[in-house]
Image: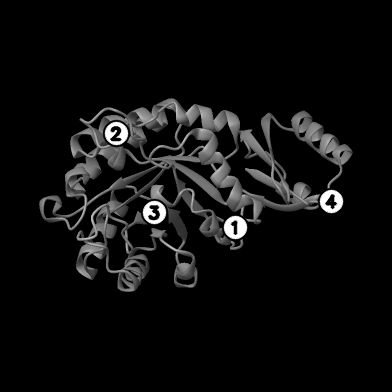
């Protein structure tokens, strides 16, 4: 749970309020001082916290429940390719326990000749899949001028290449919508957190951090998954941590062990690529699981999460 304080909050009010929270509830409080507001992250069992009492305080601007201890899995194809494809995959991953549907409509690719996504049509197809299944949709934004197109997207993803697109981050800070911020290919944790601060400084505190592997000298895997980022982020901030084992590995057979490690390390969620026909996928087929493979992996992940709680 995070609590956003009004910018007029005095130091005395802040101390008094945080002391009361510590005394009344068995929670740890992480403090995040933004440019326009102070955010308090409540870590621990927040089910006993009296939300109505908190919201009634004059210094409170908003309250948001995040990282509630459950495991969320965002699953779907790297790229939306057709209505039949995205709807079929959405229904499949939902049956396996996925709570959100991921899919790329706009695709930033290393090669200008690679498939760039269906763009606006892809967004429309994601909305059809959402209507069919009820799954919230997660998809990547590329530029500031596209923000209006994403009005009906449930979670906006900022890709690794745009982690330091500060003008985009500033504009996303002005909207009231969850943002999934991926770590840059060579970004330090401090740089990653500062990018999140750009969004929160604008007033949008609904930020999740996605570790998707960083570029190292190792060439066997696509990237190197930084598992240590999970406890580090949780120590330094209140933000939920989502792990992307697909982009980290670049190989489908590595997705399961990396995902299991992430859950064991305390990740709040995972974003996993699933395709109905990986060998013929228009992008990232090598790292995509089939629906059957995802079902088997999801069962293990939920079992592990249950064993750890």
Element under label 4?
loop
Looking at the picture, how far across and down is residue 51, in whole percent? 71, 48
Say which of marks 4 and 3 sits in front.
Answer: 4
Judging by the rendered image, the residue that carries numbered circle 3 is 100
How busy is the neighbourhood of tag 4: few (under 14 within 10 Å), some, or many (20 plus)?
Answer: few
CA distance for labels 4 and 1: 20 Å
Q: How many marks?
A: 4
Judging by the rendered image, the residue that carries numbered circle 2 is 300
Q: Nearer the viewer, residue 191 or 118?
A: 191
Element under label 1?
loop
CA distance for labels 3 and 2: 18 Å
Residue 298 in view (yes/no)? no
Task: Tell me if 148 is positioned left or right of 118 in this view.
Answer: right
Q: Nearer the viewer, residue 279 or 91?
A: 279
Looking at the picture, how far across and down is residue 256, in whole percent? 26, 34
Q: Residue at x 18, y 46 (%)?
A: 292
Q: Residue at x 89, y 37 (%)?
A: 12
In which quadrant is the N terminus drawn?
top right
Element under label 3?
strand
């Amino acid at each position: 749970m995070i609590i956003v304080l009004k910018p007029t909050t005095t130091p005395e009010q802040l101390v008094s309020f945080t002391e009361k929270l510590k005394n009344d509830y068995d929670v740890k409080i992480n403090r995040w001082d933004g440019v326009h507001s102070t955010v308090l992250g409540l870590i621990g069992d927040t089910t006993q916290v009296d939300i109505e009492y908190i919201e009634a305080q004059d210094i409170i601007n908003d309250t948001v429940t995040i990282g509630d201890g459950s495991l969320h899995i965002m699953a779907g194809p790297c790229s939306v390719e057709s209505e039949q494809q995205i709807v079929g995959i959405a229904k499949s991953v939902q049956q396996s326990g996925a709570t959100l549907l991921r899919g790329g409509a706009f695709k930033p690719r290393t090669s200008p000749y690679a498939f760039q996504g269906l763009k606006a049509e892809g967004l429309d197809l994601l909305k059809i899949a959402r209507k069919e299944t009820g799954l919230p949709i997660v998809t990547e934004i590329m530029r500031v001028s596209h923000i209006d197109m994403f009005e009906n997207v449930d979670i906006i993803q900022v890709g690794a290449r745009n982690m330091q697109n500060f003008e985009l981050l500033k504009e996303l800070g002005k909207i009231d919508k969850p943002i999934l911020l991926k770590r840059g290919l060579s970004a330090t944790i401090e740089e990653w957190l500062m990018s999140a601060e750009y969004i929160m400084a604008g007033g949008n505190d609904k930020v999740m951090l996605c570790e998707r592997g960083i570029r190292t000298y190792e060439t066997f895997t696509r990237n190197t998954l930084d598992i240590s980022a999970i406890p580090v982020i949780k120590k330094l901030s209140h933000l939920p941590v989502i792990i992307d084992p697909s982009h980290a590995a670049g190989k489908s057979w590595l997705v399961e062990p990396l995902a299991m490690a992430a859950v064991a390390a305390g990740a709040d969620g995972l974003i996993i690529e699933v395709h109905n026909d990986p060998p013929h996928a228009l992008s990232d087929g090598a790292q995509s699981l089939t629906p059957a493979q995802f079902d088997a992996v999801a069962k293990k992940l939920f079992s592990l999460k249950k064993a750890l709680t």
